Image: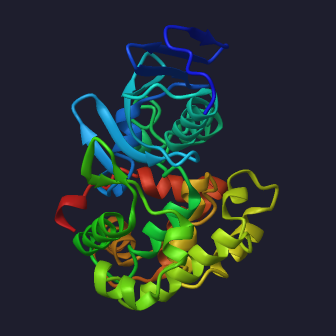
Amino acid sequence: MGTCHCGKDTQDSRTSYTHKGGQLKIRLSACSAFSLSSVVRSHGWSELTPFGICSDGLEYVDRLDSGRVVVLLIAQYRNGVTVEVSDCLDDLEREEVARKVGWMVGLNQDLSAFYSVIRNEPRLANVEERSQGRVLRCPTLFEDAVKTILTTNTNWRGTMHMVDALVAGFGDPLPSDTKRHAFPAPERIGGLDPEELRTVARLGYRAPHVVELARAVATGGLKLESFKDTEMTTHELRKCLLAIKGVGPYAAANLLMIIGRYDFVPVDSWAVRLVSREWYQGEPVGKAEVEAAFARWGKWQGLCYWLWDWAHRKGV
């Protein structure tokens, strides 16, 4: 461990650190208009452990590279966030926390080009005003990929149960509250027999896919985290994602959205029902009709679908 700079503040143009009485507070600024509540509500990830919604914003139980398990309390602060950690972290740990949180809530994303494209669309009229467009992410694309696989061929309650069981059964515990756990590392999941995942976490047919993915990431055979800032085209990146067992067109589109590529709509049964009610008076439609409904938005089509004001959503 390095030196803990308790009582010392450091600051650059967008980040500041403060240690006081064993409590670390980090302030991080966004590069453009930002709303934490819009990020939290962007999709259901905030309902999946080790995330937790609290009165001040968002919590996340994280296992740092050092092996330390901590709670990150993320709250809105001006045009950005504060992150509080009840531990006095060393330099590398606090930089890791700042980097992870910046990625999780999309502080570096500039959506001004997107806002200029949608400004005259009535169904997206409130998006810019609410600073919407950032999609909540996990600290690692590995966690995002596993959770996305666990959304396939099940309902949301089923996904929640599987994620809860996976985290509780195989994640490292939080020292101050051993009932809470971090998301299990690829090395931990990769060392399991798929049958153990089926038994403990009830992953069913997904178990071997999750284990195979974890082993590929743990051994370096799949450099999944490099996809965050790859120079590959979206189509090339989609091809790489589709090569992961358990990731089909819907899951690949969902992961592309998380990465920040919006060229594809994540078409599932819910999307089909929404489009059917919005444009086809409830008549049966398919994947082609969903994609056609948003094709005019080009590279922003997935995000336009995600943020569309569905007038009939409550009746779907």
Residue drawn 45% across the image and 38% down it: 132
Looking at the rendering, which quadrant does residue 57 occupy? Answer: top left
Where in the figure is residue 138, as x and y percent of width and height?
48, 52
**Residue 132 vertical position relative to residue 279 in the rendered view, above or below:** above
Looking at the rendering, which quadrant does residue 235 occupy? Answer: bottom right
Question: Is residue 265 in sight in this rendering?
Answer: no
Question: Is residue 118 in sight in this rendering?
Answer: yes
Where in the figure is residue 269, as x and y percent of width and height?
36, 78
Residue 273 appears left or right of 207: left
- Foreground of the two, 182 or 256: 182
**Residue 82 vertical position relative to residue 237 in the rendered view, above or below:** above
Looking at the rendering, which quadrant does residue 239 occupy? Answer: bottom right
Residue drawn 61% across the image and 59% down it: 296
Residue 305 appears left or right of 212: left
Where in the figure is residue 127, as x and y percent of width and height?
43, 38
Quadrant of the rendering where the C terminus is positioned = bottom left
Residue 105 appears left or right of 213: left
Quadrant of the rendering where the N terminus is positioned = top right
- Foreground of the two, 32 or 265: 32
Residue 162 appears left or right of 82: left
Where in the figure is residue 165, as x and y percent of width and height?
28, 70
**Residue 50 vertical position relative to residue 15 in the rendered view, above or below:** below
